[in-house]
Amino acid sequence: MAAGPGKCFLVTGPPGVGKTTLIIRVFESLKASNPSLKLQGFFTREIRQGSERVGFEVVTLDGRKAPLASTTISSPESFRWPTVGKYKVDIASFESLALPELQVREDTNLFVIDEVGKMELYSSSFFPAILKILESNIPVLASVPIPKSGRDIPAVARLKNHPGATIFTLNASNRDSVKEQMHSQLVDLLAKR
């Protein structure tokens, strides 16, 4: 199976089902089996105070971090930030760390993007960067939110309808089998590049 129009592996499922964990596990197993792979991108991690989730941070694949959203920030500029639910989204912080990770480079084997969601899409530069990656034919491993009230965010719908998209819907009982399936499909794809 040749890499057609930018192979795009999308993980979706309800909040808390383990999309980020799955992506990190696939990323780590790819890196372990082939340390010379050039992987770019980021994942999003919860910030907790005790048992309460108070925000999210963006973490690059090499471990650098920046705030994405918070319920606890109240700086003068934060009053102008967009909100998603109870979270204020720090677009400037997100862009400063995530956008450089989405620059297409010739030697990149795979982009990891967790996630293409409402918070991230407040950045007007984020989705155009993803479209540029898809045009480059470099494979993408990304997570997308499950549709709210049956409707996808337009950018998410565009990704799902991309000719190179394979969608994996995660639930509590299929996590391990989906990880194996994704890992083997990515290994096959990357071996052909």
Image (cartoon, rainbow, N blue to C red):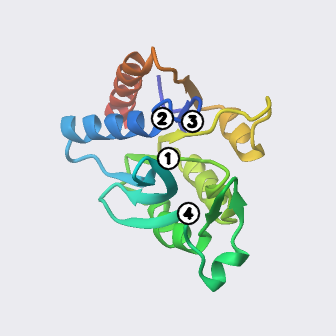
The answer to whether the residues at label 2 and label 1 have Cβ atoms under 8 Å apart is yes
Q: Residue furthest bottom?
A: 76
The kind of secondary structure element at disc 4 is strand
**Front residue (pair 64, 82):** 82
Q: Residue at x 69, y 72 (%)?
A: 81
Cα separation between marks 2 and 4? 20 Å
Look at mark 3 in the image and give the residue it sits on: 15
In contact (CB < 8 Å): disc 1 and disc 3: no
* Horizontal side of residue 168 vs 110, given as left or right: right
**In the rendering, at what x and y percent does residue 30 appear?**
28, 36
Instruction: From the viewer's perspective, tell me whether residue 59 is left or right of residue 91.
Output: left
Identify the image quadrant of the C terminus. top left
- What's the amino acid at mark 1? Asp
Image quadrant assignment for residue 15: top right
Q: Nearer the viewer, mark 2 or mark 1?
A: 2
Residue 84, percent from left and from top:
69, 55
The picture places residue 61, in percent across and down from the top left corner, at 34, 54
Q: What element does badge 3 sit on?
A: loop
Badges 4 and 3: C-beta atoms under 8 Å apart?
A: no
Residue at mark 4? 70
Residue that carries the numbered disc 1 in the rendered image = 114
Which residue in the structure is indicated by mark 2?
Answer: 19
Q: Nearer the viewer, mark 1 or mark 3?
A: 3
Q: Residue at x 44, y 40 (%)?
A: 20
Residue under the image location 52 percent in, 72 percent down: 93
Q: Earlier in the sequence, mark 1 or mark 3?
A: 3
Measure how far apart labels 4 and 3 are at the Cα level: 17 Å
Residue type at mark 3 is Pro
Do residues under tags 2 and 4 come within 8 Å of each other at their CB atoms?
A: no
Query: Is disc 2 placed on a helix, strand or loop?
Result: helix
Between circles 4 and 1, the one closer to the viewer is 4
Spatial separation of the CA atoms under disc 2 and disc 1: 8 Å
